[in-house]
Amino acid sequence: MPGPVLAVTMIKSYRSQTAGMGIALGHGAVEFPLMLLIYFGLIEFLKLPVFKSIIGLVGGLTLIYLGTGVIRHRSSSIQESENLAYNSVAAGALASASNPYFFLWWATIGAALIMKSTSFGLVGFILLATVHWLCDLGWYLTVSLAIYRTQRFWGGKLQKILYAICGLILFGFGVYFIYSAVR
């Protein structure tokens, strides 16, 4: 789904064709513990209004910070743009953890999938978690390979435009998440 994790994947993919792998690992580092919490019945915690508000505010501020950094560095060379001070694994974890809709998805649709998987016991849950993560890995790796391998067709001006768009997407999600948390 288009969102902060995809935007970060696109940014990181200019430097590394395997950035998607790191993004997926970081995303999984946030996602697997969350899936386990749901599996063990702690889903109600995710539904608490205070939890949603905190994630919305902190996540929104984090995304605004990331988006501002991307916009500020859009005129830099690709090598200089890595001064954003986080690697692909950290970027995947940060973009996932700062997205309240990631938690909302797992508290609703994801929780329903987990509950259905448990009809096959622990094996069903493990298969769901594994296949879900492999789909994430396949998607983000495909995106990073495509961006990395086609970057020679994307001139400096197009790269700056893409960085600006991705930065604005991150910034926009941040503003929206904060707005959603306080209303």
Image: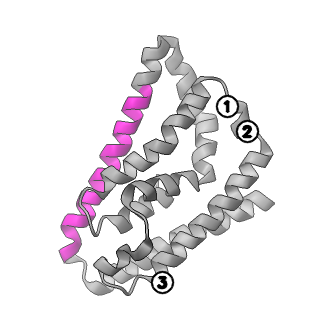
Q: Which quadrant, please, contains the C terminus? A: bottom right
- Residue type for callout 1: Ile
* Residue 173 visible in image: no
Residue 72, label in figure? 3
Secondary structure beneath dot 2 equals: helix
**Mark 3 → mark 2, Cα distance in angstroms:** 36 Å
Residue name at image x 59 percent, y 65 percent = 62
The prevailing secondary structure element of the residues shown in magenta is: helix
Which residue occupies the foreground of this view, 61 or 120?
61
Q: Can you give x and y, in whole percent of width and height, for residue 51 in the image?
A: 74, 46
Residue at the disc numbered 2:
47
- Residue designated by label 1: 43
Contact flag, marks 2 and 1 (Cβ < 8 Å):
yes
Report whether 120 appears left or right of 53.
left
Q: Earlier in the sequence, mark 1 or mark 3?
A: 1
Residue extent of the magenta highlight: 128-152
Residue drawn at x 64%, y 67% is: 61
Question: In the rendered structure, which amino acid carries the disc numbered 3?
Answer: Arg
Badge 2: few (under 14), some or many (20 or more) residues near its Cα, within 10 Å?
A: some
* Image quadrant assignment for residue 115: top right
Q: What residue is shown at x 29% (from left), y 59% (from top)?
A: 144
Percent x, y for residue 17? 23, 60
Q: Image check: 75 left or right of 148?
A: right
